[in-house]
Every structure is written in structure tokens, then in C-alpha cells.
Image (cartoon, rainbow, N blue to C red):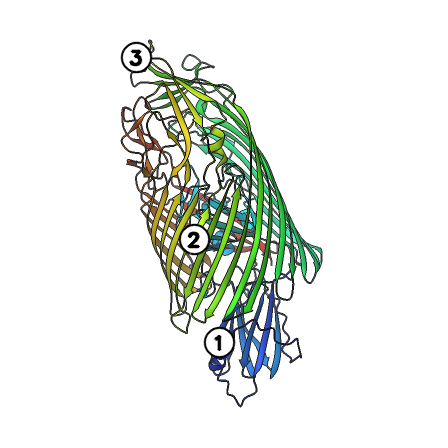
Amino acid sequence: MKLLVAMKPSLRIALAAKGFVAAMLACCLASAFNVGAQTATATLEGLITDENGQPVASVQVTLLGSAGESLTLYSDALGKFQVSNLRPGDITVDFSKPGFFRAEQQPFTIQPGENDLTLTFRHAEEVHEQVEVNSSSTRIDPENTTHEDALVSRDLITIPVPSSQLLARSLVALPQVVDDNSDQLHFAGARADQTEYLLDGFEINDPVTGAMDTNVNVDSVRVADLSTGRYGAEYAHAGGGVLALETTEGDDRWRFGVTDFLPGINFDSGTHLGNWYPRVTFSGPIMKGRAWFSDAATLQHTFKIETGLPAGQNSTTQWLGDNLLRASVKISSRQTLQGSFLYNQASEMGVGLTVFTPISTTVNLTSRRGIISAKDQFVFSRALLEFGVAGDLGKINSAPQAKFPYMIPAEIPNGTPYIVTPSGYLGRYFQAVDSRPHRIQFIGNALVPRLRWRGTHDLSAGLTADGTTWSQSASRTEVDALLANGALYSMSTFNGPGSFHLSDARAGVYAQDGWQILRALRVQYGVRVDWDRIAQRTLVQPRVSLNYLPFASNNTKFSAGWGKYFQPLNLTLIGQAYDQQEVDSFYSVTGTAPLSNPVRSAFLLPAGHLLLPYFGTSSAEWEQRILEHTFVDVSFTDRTGRDGLAYENTSPGAAVQLLMLGNQQRDTYRAGEMSVRHQFSEKSEIAFDYTRSSSRTNEAINYTLGSIFYAPQLPGPLPWDAPNRIVSHGWTPLHFWNLLGSYLLEYHTGFPFNAVDQEEQLVGLPGSQRFPAYFSLDLGVEKRFHFRHREWALRLTGINVTGHKDPDSVINNVDAPVFPVFAGGQGRALTVRLRLVGAK
């Protein structure tokens, strides 16, 4: 594959200068290129589009004169750039942006007068030719005020991780991304539902829980961009941050890729189909130059053995599948219509199996979800407009094991209730749930870049709207809690209707300006207004940030900002008030005589309307480029949540426990981060990041049916709080057999957990205990070879090569024979990955 570069080096008379660049910038250019008053000058206007004719913003354009002088500027939202007062003559031009192939030393002749340059800039697809050069994924962008980290496709392919078929496992290579013990991701200390997840511009959070539980073929992801501070007003539901995924589109070339198509065989406890994660990508033209498509599918079969359990009772099976189909049609040179359909389906047996939760206590989970979207984009001479709509349909069913085929009937007969003991769990899980979430969303944006008035202005405005409906039906059986001596301590039953239907709607508008006041100073300011139907309230959110570049080389940048960010209402919390009530009966130490009347617990909504939760986030950052290929970044983030939703026990100790939903929750996150990234060559780089942070809340108790603490809310660390975290990754060619070596190292403080007593009540403060410190080192080595006119890549990855014990489960009952007892986690393992790269 070669770069497609289309240039017009000859002088042509174009439209009159459109005035996108300030006079002050023109003066700087004149100085840089030694323009004298007596010398004829020239103007250069450029347009950068991708292989499908779409404008490419934020491309770094570097002009290099014959005398060694240089000038760097960036394309705007329309893919345009303009520079005036150039001296005629021969120059070379470099183009670079993460996620694209670099175009280097492109020759161009500046003629007196007006000059036009057009570039077709290709996305960085993995190919076998070695002439393609990827743009560096690290740079200092003087126009970007956001605190962000990104992984481009090369990072996702190269960094070795366990379960590489799951995008979430690769995201832990980003600073401030923590994977908790239940495999939920937390970005910059936020809860799983407090980050806005975007797929090609549309929100893919679970419509009800707000979590990221949607699978996308990792080979189809071009860029995973995480913003955790100073992001703009265009983001609607980004209380804790924004993760934006950009996936591949088709173009005029036929492409086919396949990964891990050979199934594994597991011989532990018999012969089984082992882990098998085939992935396929396919793209090409529907009509060359006019319409394109891409399709990316994943099939996942996971066979897991839980050590420490008897044979026949120690395995779980999981089937997952996802498919992303995209299509785009270039209706005209100014209009493009895009559409996509993402489908997920899962069937999981034995969910929740650990040493402490045997197979009888696990559940079987089935789910399916489809997200269909369409977006129309118009490009005018000085503006870009886009409108889009997406529909989201889902169904989730969770059911306990129907019978106990692995249990001796004399030990635990069928029909035994769910039993909680100080040392673990027995019986049949108590809850079955059928959930059906639906959502529709609308987006509209307008961008007008490079308007001139006392500098330049990049104006944007837009609107968002979405509506969610959710139906849930649940049935629950008895839960028995036993003392250490085996006597019955409490029996929990549930009454009332277990079915309900909820709906909510939200709408918001925003306006924003990026003002380049001087070469060294840029200010971005805007305001967003969001409304929620359940709360019947409106929230105004101002946001402001700035960049300051103290030196003309642009190798140093200081950024700072503050913003107010809306956090949508969590429907799962509100739904608890429409669900069943719990009735707990307590018994004497012999387990035969009730001590008192049963205690009833009810979840309630307040009489008035709820407030809208939000975060106030301040951040500051210093970026420094050292020499040519070393980047150092030091940043600080302070985020405080206000009016957060949580249930509070308003009557502890009473016969009727009233759990009232309120707006008193306040989460705080403070972090200092230092990172270094150095690129030795095109095929060799290393990154290191250390984060010191604190994630805490004033209401740490999570009251849920089947697990109610009879205590008021208490402060404590959040379950994913990791005060110290180090993450480092890199890759380099090895000096034998043309191998590529890579690694991923992660260390963090152990996560906190609650201690309880044999009565299942909290002991001490929430989060007063911690897991052991986590440490994992993954090493990968890849060999490329040719077979049947195709290039292949075979990688062996050693997972947790040091064999460090990283448990993710614990017996947290202080009355257990041994407290605490840790188990689970990723042990030492070896994985194999085979990929088709391209034709020879």
C-alpha cells in the first residue's frame, strides 16, 4: 500500500483569500520565512481529506524551507489550513496525525500569489509493505486544551495483554484506567457509569446502568481516545470523562483480516473446546469513489477452570459474539451519509464461579443488544453540519442454575435456598432477572472554524436528546445466613411486585468558542444546558480551559481549566424503589427461635424532585518535548461530585428500615500524574506512567436487595481506589530471527474491601481492609512470516510471567476460620495469537 498524495504544485488562480488566519499569525510567518517588504509574497491554502473525501482535522502541517527555516500549523475542522506572506521557492511539507500514515518531505513549489495544495491522508491500516510510516501517537498540539490519552490501532495490536480479544483489557495500558476485581473499568477514579462511551459519535453506554458492557472487534478500532479533564461542552453525559472509539471505514481497496482462527483444546478435567477467539474484518467499495462498507465480527468461546474446586464442579463456559457493520455514501463532494449496526449476543454459564461460590450458586446469563445509527454530514465553504439518530434495543436474562447436577443430593438437595456462611456460599442463587432496556438518541452539531476578530475563533454549537425505557421482571427466593456454628442467624424473604417499567428523557444544548488570542495563548470557553424529565430540572454547566506556550518552538505547553459536568440519573437506583421489599427474620444462637418481629426494608423515592448530579473538575498540565522524540507530561486533577444519588438508611434500628434515595452523595478524586514516552525509532518506543491518586466518597455503603447493612451511610474509599499505580509498555525489534518484542507492566496498591461479621453486618469503616498489592508483567514476542503469498504474524505472550499472586476474591467475614482468605486472579499463562497481515 502506498500513500495516496494528490498535490497541485503549479500556480493557479483560486478564490480570494478567505481570511481564516489572524494578521498576527501572518506576521509570525513573515518573520519565520524572512519575508521582506520588497519581496513578492505568496499565500498557501490547503485541504486535507481522508481516503473517502472526509475532512481531517488537527493534522500537523510542517513547512520546511530550503534554508532550514520551518513553520508548523494545524488543519481546522474542515480539513483546511492557510498561511500568508510566504517567500516563493521550493519547500517540503510534512503531514502527521496519530492514527494516520505520515506523509514526509512532500515537495512543493511556492509561486508568487495564491497557491493551493490538496492532500489525501490515509488512515494507518496494518499492511505488509514497510514503506508505510505511522504517525507518532504522542505530540504536543498547541490547539488542543483537553487532557487526553489515546491508543491507536498499532498500540492495540502490539501491547501484550491477557484476553486480547477484549478491548477493555487493552485500555488498562492508559494512565488512570483501573480494572477492578469485577472486571469493570474505571477512568480517572470515576464510577463505571460516570464515563461517556462513544462509538463513532454515538453513545453506547448501557441505557440503564450506564456501564461499558458493549463489545467491539478490537481489530476494527482505529483510535481509543480517553479525555479526563478540560473536555468541551459538546459532551453531554461525561461526568467523569469521555472514551471515544473511532472504527474503520471501507475505502476503494479490498481488505481482509483474520485473527486467532484456530481453536484451542483444553485437556484439564477431560477434553474440551478451549479458549477460541476468532476475529474477522472485511471492507471494500460498494461503488468505487462513491460508497464503501466495512464489517468486523468476533466470536469468543472461553472455557475457564477455577482451581481449588473439585473436578466436574470447577469449570464455566462463555460464548460471546459481536458484529459491527458500517457503510458510507458520498452523496456529493459536500455531503456524506454514514450508517452502522452493532450487534452483541452472549450466553454465559456459571457466572460468578469462584473458590467461595460453587457452581450451584452461580447464574446463567443470556443477552443480546443491537445499536443502529445513521449520520448525515454537510460541509460548506466555512461550516460543517451533522445530524444523527441511533436506536438501541437490548434484552438481558439472568437465571440461577436449574438444578445441582454436580452436587451430592444428601449434601445439598434441590430446592435448598441460597445460604450465606462465614466461609462462603451454598445452595441455589436467590434471584432471577429479566431486563429489557431501549433507547433512542439524536445529535446535531455545527462547526465554524477560523473566524477572525482579535485573533481567530473556532465556533461550535449543537444539541442532543435521548429517551430511555426500561422494563424489568424479577423473582427472588429465600436467603439464609448461618453463624459459624452452622445455626440459622437470619432468613430473608421478598414480597411485593417484582416487575416495573421506567422511562426517562434528556435534552441538552451547547455553544462553545476556541479563541486563539495570540500565538502563545488559546482559550476555549463554552456553556452547556441539560434537562432531565424525571428530575424536572435544568443544569447549566460552564466550561473554560486555556493553553499557554511560552516558547516559540512550541516544545512546551501549559494547560489549565475548570468545568461543570452533568451526570445522568442512574435508572437502576431509581428502579429499586419500584422493586420488591426485603423482610428479615432473626433467630437465637440455636437457630430455632425468632428473636423479634421481622424487619422490613423498603426503598423509597423522595416526595420532591431529585437534583441533577454533576462534577466540578479542575485540572492543570505541563507538557514538555525534550530533543526530538521524548515527551514528558506532569498533570494534576481535582474532581468533586455534587448531588450524587445514593440510598440512605433514615431509620437504623427500627422495625421498618426506610432507605430513602437522596442527593447527599459526594465523590472526590484527586490525582497527580507523571508520564514519559520516548520513541527510539519507528518500531521501538517505551512509555512509563506513575499516578498518585485518591478516590473517596462520603456514602460508601451500597444497599441492595439481599445485601442490606443495618447501619447509616459512612464515608470511605471507593472499591477501585488505588493510591499508587504504575503502568509501562513498549516494543522493540529483537536482534535475532527478526522478532518484535513487547511488554506491559502494571502495579497498583491493592483495592479496598469491606469486612463483615457472621451476622453479615459491617465491621469497622467501609473499605478498611485491602487486597494485596497487584503486580503483573506480560511479555510478547512476534514473528512475521510468509505463507501461500500472504504475510502472517505469530505472537506468543507470557501472561503474568512472574507468577505474582493477584487475587480478586476474598472471604471478608471476620468470623470465618481464617480471615481474610484470598483467591482467584490471573495466574501465569501462555497465549498464542496468529494474524493474517496482508498479501505478499
Q: Amino acid at mark 3?
A: Ser
Q: Relative to 689, is 334 on the left or the right?
A: right
Marks 1 and 2 in Cβ contact (< 8 Å): no
| Label 2 sits on residue | 563
Q: Nearer the viewer, residue 84 or 431?
A: 84
> Which badge, 1 or 3, comes first in the chain's sequence?
1
> Which badge, 3 or 2, comes first in the chain's sequence?
2
Q: Which image quarter holds the N terminus?
A: bottom right
Question: Residue sitting at 54 percent across and 72 percent down?
Answer: 21
Question: Residue sitting at 30 percent across and 11 percent down?
Answer: 590
Q: Nearer the viewer, residue 93 or 719?
A: 719
Marks 3 and 2 in Cβ contact (< 8 Å): no
The crowding category of the residue bearing disc 3, from other C-alpha atoms within 10 Å (few below 14, some 14 to 19, many at least 20), is some
The crowding category of the residue bearing disc 2, from other C-alpha atoms within 10 Å (few below 14, some 14 to 19, many at least 20), is many
Marks 1 and 3 in Cβ contact (< 8 Å): no
| Label 3 sits on residue | 588
- Identify whether 173 is placed above or below 523: above
Per the model, the C-alpha gap separating discs 1 and 3 is 84 Å
Is residue 231 at least partly visible in the picture? Answer: yes
Q: Relative to 391, is 766 on the left or the right?
A: left
Where does residue 150 sit, x and y in percent of width and height?
46, 55
Q: Amino acid at mark 1?
A: Met
Of badges 3 and 2, nearer the viewer stands: 2
Label 3 SS = loop
- Identify whether 222 is placed above or below 536: below
